[in-house]
Image: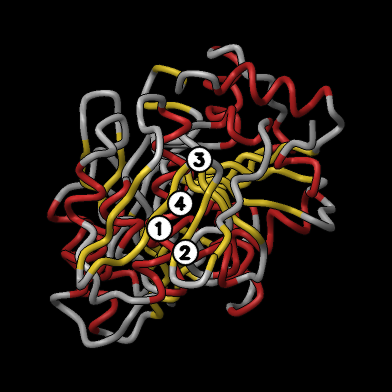
């Protein structure tokens, strides 16, 4: 059997919604990652969350039964620190509007954190902090208004947890954005620096990026010209996929990480009909009609992959009824 992963030398994973949901592993993730390592595939863990240090991520993953070493983890805090190190002088004063993990990373590359805007910071750097307060956001806005350069780890507006969707760094950054007339310089997905840093760290030649969000993970992979694999265990599902813009369309899909170890799902055009294994999708008037066996999750994934080929080519088609039949998919 030829597996999807056989075409790649490195699998890079988003974390929240892909490998774990808060304190719980995603079903199939520990076993799948162990199997990839046994096959000799290099494994990297990539997170837009600048609120957690690599050491914390390593401990979390190992505690879930997922083998992880510090060199396997690349965070947006590391990526933004490296980006600022290339653009700002050593010792520059920074107002850090983020968690201790971000403070540690910018300090490690030679910057000087300051307490508030009155100390005249050269730049502001923002990252996710679950303990964020409005006075700290105000400090960031005041510093930027006075000419400080503005950097951000990532702009994820929300993040999946085991309890539901919660506000992310992007929500905190948006609160500052309404007070200033500039945009931040961003390292995290979908911007290239974080994935570029990861590819370099992994020494990857043929990497694939695995994620649950079209607007960060998949777009991020496309922005650095690598293949991507969308899973349905986190933020985005069939409805978002069917209406995805070109830059947010994945190379492949699977329900969870176990799909990496199964054959590649191929969709083939046969005149005006799309066939994916046993599933067929076609346009009838302005509607998408799907046929074939749909009782199993894998069969519904086949049907979805056929459906989206139609909707991506012809966005005016109405796929609502066809998508609604895929009741095992979010």
Q: Residue at x 24, y 71 (%)?
A: 317
First-in-chain label (2 vs 3) = 2
Residue under label 2, please give it: 249
Q: Is residue 298 visible?
A: yes
Q: Position of residue 80 (x, y in %)?
A: 54, 62
Q: Residue 278 has which mark? A: 3
Identify the residue at image location x=80%, y=41%. 6
Nearer the viewer's eye, disc 4 or disc 3? Answer: 3
Snapshot quadrant of residue 324: top left
Q: In the rendered image, which residue does mark 1 sit on?
A: 214
Whole-Å distance between the Cαs marked 2 and 1? Answer: 7 Å
The residue under label 4 is 305
Mark in the foreground, 4 or 1: 4
Label 2 neighbourhood size at 10 Å, few (<14), some (14-19), many (20+)? many
**In the rendered structure, are the residues bearing label 2 and label 1 in contact, judged by CB atoms less than 8 Å apart?**
yes
Indicate whether 180 appears above or below 111: below
């Amino acid at each position: 059997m030829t597996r999807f992963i056989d075409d790649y030398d490195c699998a890079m994973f988003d974390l929240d919604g892909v490998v774990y949901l808060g304190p719980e592993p995603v079903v199939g993730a520990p076993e799948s990652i162990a199997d990839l390592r046994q096959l000799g595939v290099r494994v990297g863990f990539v997170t837009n969350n600048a609120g957690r240090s690599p050491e914390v991520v390593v401990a979390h993953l190992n505690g879930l039964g997922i083998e992880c070493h510090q060199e396997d983890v690349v965070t947006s805090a590391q990526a933004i620190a490296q980006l600022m190190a290339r653009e700002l002088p050593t010792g520059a004063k920074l107002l850090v509007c983020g968690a201790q993990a971000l403070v540690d990373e910018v300090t490690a590359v030679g910057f000087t954190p300051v307490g508030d805007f009155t100390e005249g910071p050269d730049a502001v750097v923002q990252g996710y902090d679950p303990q964020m307060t409005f006075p700290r956001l105000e400090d960031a806005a005041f510093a930027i208004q006075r000419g400080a350069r503005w950097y951000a780890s990532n702009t994820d507006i929300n993040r999946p947890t085991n309890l539901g969707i919660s506000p992310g760094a992007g929500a905190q950054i948006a609160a500052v954005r309404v007070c200033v007339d500039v945009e931040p310089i961003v390292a995290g997905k979908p911007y290239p620096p974080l994935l570029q840093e990861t590819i370099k760290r992994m020494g990857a030649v043929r990497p694939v990026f695995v994620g649950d969000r079209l607007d960060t993970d998949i777009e991020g992979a496309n922005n650095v010209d690598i293949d991507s694999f969308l899973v349905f265990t986190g933020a985005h599902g069939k409805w978002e996929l069917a209406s995805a813009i070109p830059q947010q369309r994945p190379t492949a899909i699977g329900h969870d990480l176990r799909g990496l170890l199964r054959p590649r799902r191929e969709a083939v055009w046969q005149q005006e009909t799309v066939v994916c294994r046993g599933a067929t999708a076609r346009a009838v008037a302005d509607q998408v009609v799907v046929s074939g066996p749909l009782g199993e999750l894998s069969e519904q994934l086949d049907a979805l992959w056929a459906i989206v080929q139609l909707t991506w080519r012809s966005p005016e088609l109405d796929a609502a009824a066809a998508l609604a039949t895929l009741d095992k998919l979010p």
